[in-house]
Amino acid sequence: MTQETLFLLMDYDELSREVDWLRSRGFNPIPIPRGRKEVQGYSWKEYQTHIMSKEDFDRISQWHPCNVAIVCGQTSGNLCVADIDGPIPDALKELPERTLTSETGKGFHLYLRGPKPIRGYTIRSERYGVRIDIRGQGNYVVCPPSLHPSGKEYRWVERDKEVLFVKDPSEVSLGPRKPERSISEFLEK
C-alpha cells in the first residue's frame, strides 16, 4: 500500500476528529507532511509558546496530506515524551500500563506530564540497551494516526489511558542519571 493510498483511507474528517481529540487531552497538535517527521512550509517554533489555532491547523493541513505532531512542553500541559527506539526495556515494562503510550515506526512513545516544562535530553543506550530521547520544551513528537517514513502507521497502545504526572522523569527511571528508586517502588505508591 502506498503512502497516497493510506492517506486516502484517512479522510479529512477523520483527521479533524483526531486533532480535536488531541486538543481535548490538552495537547498542542501541529501538521507535518504525511510520511515525514519534519515540519515543512511554516515555522513551528512559535507554537512552543502559543497553541496553534484550529483554523491555522486546517489551513496548513488542507493543502497536502499530513501527519500530526504534538508540541512538547508548556503548550501541551508540560508534556514530555520518552521516545524509545526499539522495544521497551525490562526496567520500564510497567510504565505503558500507567500512561498514554503509542507505537512508532521504530519503537514507542511514553507520554508524561510534570509541574513545569523540561528540556529534552538523551539517555545513553548503554543504560537500557536502546536509545531513549526525552522530548521536552523545544521538541515535538509525531503521533497517531501518522505514517512513519518506514511506512508503518503510528498507533495508540491504549487510547484512553491518562498521561502520568511525575515531578521529574527520574521518578520513573527516565532521568538523565541513574534513579535512586526503581520504577516498581514508584508504582507501588
Image (cartoon, helix red, strand yellow):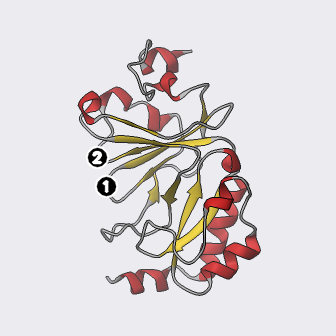
On screen, 4 above or below 45? below
- Quarter of the rendering containing residue 148: bottom left
Crowd class of label 1 (few under 14; some 14 to 19; many from 20; radius 10 Å) = some
User: At which x and y percent is residue 69?
Assistant: 54, 62
User: At which x and y percent is residue 93?
Assistant: 37, 32
Q: CA distance from mark 2 to mark 1?
A: 6 Å
On screen, 81 above or below 2? above
Q: Residue at x 74, y 70 (%)?
A: 54
Element at label 1: loop
Q: Amino acid at mark 2?
A: Gly
Element at label 2: loop
> Is disc 2 in contact with disc 1, using a CB cutoff of under 8 Å?
yes
- Quarter holding the N terminus is bottom left
Residue tagged 1: 106
Q: Nearer the viewer, residue 165 or 130?
A: 130
Image-based side of 144 in relation to 107, left or right: right
- Quarter holding the C terminus is top right
Q: Amino acid at mark 1?
A: Lys
Q: Residue at x 34, y 69 (%)?
A: 149
Crowd class of label 2 (few under 14; some 14 to 19; many from 20; radius 10 Å) = some
Which mark identifies residue 177? none
- Quarter of the rendering containing residue 58: bottom right
Image-based side of 55 in relation to 32, left or right: right
Q: Nearer the viewer, residue 51 or 26?
A: 51
Of the two numbered discs 2 and 1 on the same chain, state the one appearing first in sequence. Answer: 2
Q: Nearer the viewer, residue 145 or 75?
A: 75
Residue tagged 2: 86
Q: Residue at x 34, y 67 (%)?
A: 152
Q: Residue at x 50, y 41 (%)?
A: 120
Image-based side of 20 in relation to 121, left or right: right
User: At which x and y percent is residue 166?
Assistant: 59, 28
